Amino acid sequence: MSEEKNDRGKRNEVFSGNNPQGLPSTNVMMEDFGFEVPVETVPLPSRGVTYPADSPMHGVETLSIRAMTAREEDILTSKALIKKGTVISELLKSCIVDKGFDPDAALTGDRNALMVALRITGYGAGYRVEVDCPACGQRSKQEFNLAELPIKRLEIDPISLGANLFECELPVTKKTVRWRFLSGKEEREISQTAERRKKQGQLNDNLVTTRLTHCLQSVGGITDKNKLSFFIRNMPAKDSLFLRRYIDKNEPGIDMKSWMDCPSCLESSEVKLPLGASFFWPDAE
């Protein structure tokens, strides 16, 4: 019985890619078609300092990604993945060379940096999309260069290395609060909850408190979830605005803002680039 188990284990090693028998392997794209799928190095805005010591992301400042291919287009068009809301996670899993990377556990800003890099490797840096002019409200198609978007690196220190936990003092209540940046999984859960409420005919009138509930971890040393929920709903508006702006200002990621020239009013304005369906399916024109 033990010999049969050992024999099965050896066969499994071959299929898992360990290849202890020294079986020949081939790179069909390179050897038969003369093309090597490019691999790029992408800097992580968080510098890996917010991931715990037992995470493969701990202290990692860059990740290697393989350029998008037709099989990634299959992922982007998968109705099952779209329905589950996991398209981007599966896309990242498919293209990240470093297989220890968990897209769901990654900070939103790190995910966004990788998404922009993948878009550039797949379809180029040109991003043609419709935006509204902040000056006159007129909608027009604009061309943006994704390669010019600056990376916002994490510049504040967490309470300890490897902890996604930060501190600041609120201006009105003078309470010291501890908060965290959201992960890709948490962002997806918030979006899915909002979508369910919308389908049920409920108003999404709690967006501010919902996000703060996910971010806020303690207030003045109090960590009880029920008490924190009560504080969030009743905190002074000035404290709420301060905290949200402080988190947004310091969140690592890609600065998705650029300048446009409006063909209607001729004003130059800074706009936030939308990440709609056209981000991964560029305009053919």
Image: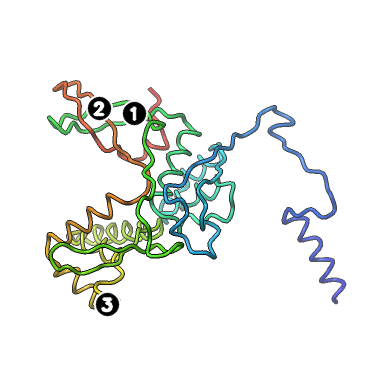
Q: Residue furthest right?
A: 3
Instruction: Give the side of residue 42 with respect to residue 258, left or right.
Output: right
Specify which label sits upstream in the sequence, 2 or 3. 3
**Residue indicated by mark 1:** 144
Q: Rounded to the nearest whole Å, what is the CA distance between mark 1 and mark 2?
A: 8 Å
Asked which quadrant contains residue 272, the reply is: top left
Asked which quadrant contains residue 172, the reply is: bottom left
Q: Nearer the viewer, mark 1 or mark 3?
A: 3
**Residue indicated by mark 3:** 222
Instruction: Give the side of residue 32 with respect to residue 275, left or right.
Output: right
Q: SS at mark 2?
A: strand
| Viewer-nearest residue: 107 or 1 | 107
Tell me the quarter of the image containing the C terminus. Answer: top left
Residue 249 in percent (x, y) is at: 27, 49
State the scheme by which the image is colored: rainbow
Specify which label sits upstream in the sequence, 1 or 3. 1
> Which kind of residue does numbered mark 1 sit on?
Phe
Q: Are the residues flagged by discs 1 and 3 in contact, CB closer than 8 Å? A: no
Instruction: Give the side of residue 91 with respect to residue 141, left or right.
Output: right
**Residue indicated by mark 2:** 260
Badge 3 density bin: few <14, some 14–19, many ≥20, Cα 10 Å: few
Q: Are the residues flagged by discs 1 and 2 in contact, CB closer than 8 Å? A: yes
Badge 1 density bin: few <14, some 14–19, many ≥20, Cα 10 Å: some
> Which kind of residue does numbered mark 3 sit on?
Ile
Q: SS at mark 3?
A: loop
Q: Rounded to the nearest whole Å, what is the CA distance between mark 2 and mark 3?
A: 46 Å
> Which kind of residue does numbered mark 2 sit on?
Met
Residue 110 in percent (x, y) is at: 43, 49
Instruction: Give the side of residue 34 with respect to residue 224, left or right.
Output: right
